[in-house]
């Protein structure tokens, strides 16, 4: 199975800050990497698919990058409504595997 | 509007069975590859099972942790996907989500396995 190591597990930032979250795969996943936002009590919501494609309706302050084994989610200017837990998912091969999550809070 | 609604969760004793249903609307279900994913009380997400479309002979795949105990199935006439869970263990306790190829997710249903 492909292991996904997500960092940091916890992040505290201020409104307007640039925030980056990372996922490292144990092997090349060929850009088959999605990013999700999960708010308390809700289902995960797709933000970015296949590394750098913004899902319809998602604000442009969210972006993704990466290749090979290393991937990054960037929030260019943190907003209060971005407080949530963020997960990465590799769907390059079965079984799909998820990162451990990054809990993002406001400073 | 795409919608996925899971039902069938609850409290069940170890060794017992439960069947989850995911009813969908707003897209062409018969062409979709559907998955079940679960989230443990510790918030870790785990892929559980996949079923492909009729054009792929309804091929199914399972996580090792549930293989031989869980069965994924679908009814294209009802735009629904199912997860039959047998021989349940305490470690199967989780919120179970159905998802269409990782883009749209349901709200999830809680399954608690406890004596």
Image (spheres, rainbow, N blue to C red):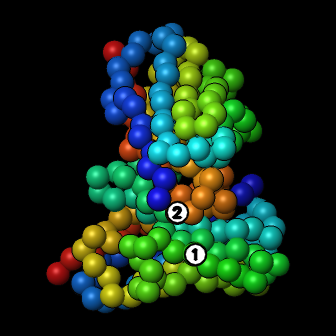
**Which label was assigned to residue A69?**
none
As measured in the structure, the alpha-carbon distance from the residue carrying label 1 to the one carrying label 2 is 9 Å
Quadrant in the rendering for residue B3: bottom right
Question: Does the image show residue A38?
Answer: no
Residue B90 position in % (x across, y down) = 24, 74
Name the residue at 56% across, 23% down: A74
Q: Quadrant of the C terminus of chain B?
A: bottom left
On whether disc 1 and disc 2 are found on a single subunit, the reply is no
Name the residue at 82% across, 78% down: B55
Residue A60 position in % (x across, y down) = 69, 23
Of B64 and B95, nearer the camera is: B64
Residue B87 position in % (x across, y down) = 33, 88
The residue singled out by tag 2 in the image is A95
Q: Mark 2 falls within which chain?
A: A
Of B49 and B38, nearer the camera is: B49
The residue singled out by tag 1 in the image is B61
CB atoms of marks 1 and 2 within 8 Å: yes
Name the residue at 44% across, 49% down: A3
Q: Secondary structure at mark 1?
A: strand
């Amino acid at each position: 199975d492909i292991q996904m190591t997500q960092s940091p597990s916890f992040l505290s930032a201020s409104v307007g800050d640039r925030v980056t979250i990372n996922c490292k795969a144990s092997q090349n996943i060929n850009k088959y990497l999605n990013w999700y936002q999960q708010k308390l009590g809700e289902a995960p919501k797709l933000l970015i698919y296949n590394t750098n494609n913004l899902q319809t309706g998602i604000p442009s302050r969210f972006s993704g990058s990466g290749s090979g084994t290393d991937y990054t989610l960037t929030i260019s200017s943190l907003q209060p409504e971005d407080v949530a837990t963020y997960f990465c998912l590799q769907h390059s091969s079965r079984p799909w595997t998820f990162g451990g999550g990054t809990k993002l809070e406001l400073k | 509007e795409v919608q996925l609604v899971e039902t069938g969760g609850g409290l069940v004793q170890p060794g017992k069975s439960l069947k989850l249903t995911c009813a969908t609307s707003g897209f062409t279900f018969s062409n979709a590859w559907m998955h079940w994913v679960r989230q443990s009380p510790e918030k870790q997400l785990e892929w559980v099972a996949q079923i492909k479309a009729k054009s792929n002979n309804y091929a199914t795949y399972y996580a090792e942790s549930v293989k031989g105990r869980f069965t994924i199935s679908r009814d294209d006439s009802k735009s629904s996907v199912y997860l039959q869970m047998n021989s349940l263990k305490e470690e199967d306790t989780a919120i179970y989500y159905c998802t269409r190829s990782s883009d749209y997710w349901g709200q999830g249903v809680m399954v608690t396995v406890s004596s």
